Amino acid sequence: MNEKTSKLVKISLLSAIAIILRYIEFPIIPAFTWLQFDFSDVPAMLGAFGFGPIAGIIIELLKNVLILVIKGTGTGFVGELANFLMGSALVVPAGLLYYRKKNKKNAIIGMILGAVCIQIVGILSNIYILLPAYHMTMDNTMLMNYITFGLLPINGIKAVATSVVTYILYKKLSVAIFKAESNFGSQERTTN
């Protein structure tokens, strides 16, 4: 199998794992039960670290398109769009920074940057895209409560949990799947 085919197969497998993980979602903030938590961004982050940020976006996109085909939508596509936007906001900055120079420091800084980006994208996309698309209107107080007690905590938890699990898994899977150093790329890598 050539390198390109191998890469496509691995991205497809990561997408399939992401779809399965997307099925295991649950609310963690009682007041905002529609804000669901799942680990489906972990395969996308692994793909972004191993193959670059475009692979992370592809995994996020495939996960959400295929979940629509398999499961359908209960939110008029708003939930799937939100999942794609938040997941991409998390994995792209992390993958971009790490893929440029693969070392432990860039991995950690990238994940922190991704955590900041998911918060910014979460707030802006909810105010200007997602809430209007879902026909939810909120006065300023309700909106601030939603952002402060709903969006910020769920996106923060998602960012931290995804980053920690990715850090642990990538370290173990890097040689077998991504042909990278087993010490989480503490030395610069130029191939792939």
Image: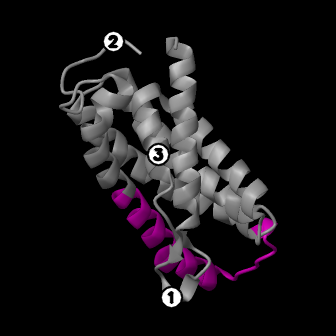
Labels 3, 1: front one: 3
Residue assigned mark 2: 190
Chain-order first, disc 3 or disc 1 = 1
Tell me the amino acid under the disc marked 3.
Answer: Pro
Chain-order first, disc 3 or disc 2 = 3
Q: Is residue 128 visible?
A: no
- Report whether 175 appears left or right of 143: left
Q: Secondary structure at mark 1?
A: helix
Residue at coordinates 52% horizontally, 55% vertically from top-left? 120
Vertical comparison of 62 with 25: above or below: above
> Would you say the residues marked 3 and 2 are in contact, meaning their CB atoms lie under 8 Å apart?
no
Residue assigned mark 3: 43
Q: Which residues are magenta?
A: 132-161
Tell me the amino acid under the disc marked 2.
Answer: Thr
Labels 3, 2: front one: 3
> Which disc is residue 30 wearing?
1
Asked if the stretch drawn in magenta spans residue 187, the answer is: no
Tell me the amino acid under the disc marked 1.
Answer: Pro
How far apart are the alpha carbons under marks 3 and 2? 22 Å
Q: Residues within 10 Å of mark 1 (few under 14, many from 20)?
A: few
Vertical comparison of 191 with 166: above or below: above
Residue at coordinates 50% horizontally, 88% vertically from top-left? 30
